[in-house]
Amino acid sequence: MQNIYYTTREAYGRQFNYRAFWQQLSKQGEIVVAKAYATHRGDEGQLKFQSALKHIGFTLRLKPYIQRSDGSAKGDWDVGITIDVMDAANEVDTVVLLSGDGDFDQLLDKIIKDCNVSAEVYGVPSLTATSLQQSASAFHPITQALLL
């Protein structure tokens, strides 16, 4: 979830509207599982963001923010997201991924084939890997309607 926040700021200079996203998905059917992934630093702004996501209806998955000695940071959720999607794919008709990360293309290929689900991706077109867009059953570009 944090990645989309930064991606929309980079691409559009605006924040992603998580409430509008939730409302848009709710119109398409029942939301069975909704997880948001973030790193946890504990600062006030981030705590407000996490609280807002919980209030909307997301279950938060948090990892501690790790600052390496070289100044880089670690907080990758790819494996956790993959495991959660694989688990959920057996219980839902459609998996919705809010990401631009091409690393998830193989995951979508697998769940579409093995679990017989639809896999939809929402992302910023210019910052979403072509392979991810092509692997999705449907790609939904993030437009003005999903921005604050």
Image (cartoon, rainbow, N blue to C red):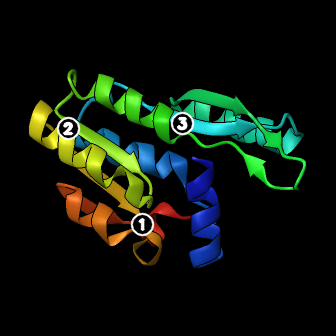
Q: Position of residue 147 (x, y in %)?
A: 54, 64
Residue under numbered circle 3: 36
Structural crowding at the residue carrying mark 1, measured as other residues with C-alpha within 10 Å and reported as few (<14), some (14–19) or many (≥20): some
Real-space Cα separation, disc 2 to disc 1, in angstroms: 23 Å
Q: Earlier in the sequence, mark 2 or mark 1?
A: 2
| Closest to the observer, 147 or 107 | 107
Q: Position of residue 34 (x, y in %)?
A: 43, 31
Query: Could you say which quadrant of the image residue 17 lies in?
Result: bottom right
Q: Nearer the viewer, mark 1 or mark 3?
A: 3
Q: Position of residue 49 (x, y in %)?
A: 71, 41
Q: Is residue 79 depicted above or below 128 in this figure? A: above
Query: Could you say which quadrant of the image residue 29 lies in?
Result: top left
Hey, what amino acid is under mark 2? Answer: Ile
Disc 3 is placed on an element classified as strand
Disc 2 is placed on an element classified as helix
Structural crowding at the residue carrying mark 3, measured as other residues with C-alpha within 10 Å and reported as few (<14), some (14–19) or many (≥20): some
Real-space Cα separation, disc 1 to disc 3, in angstroms: 17 Å
| Closest to the observer, 56 or 133 | 133
Hey, what amino acid is under mark 1? Answer: Ile
Structural crowding at the residue carrying mark 2, measured as other residues with C-alpha within 10 Å and reported as few (<14), some (14–19) or many (≥20): many
Q: Is residue 122 depicted above or below 11 in this figure? A: above
Hey, what amino acid is under mark 3? Answer: Ala
C-beta proximity under 8 Å, tags 3 and 2? no
C-beta proximity under 8 Å, tags 2 and 1? no
Residue 111 is labelled as 2
In percent of the image, x 77 and y 50: which residue is there? 73
Residue under numbered circle 1: 142
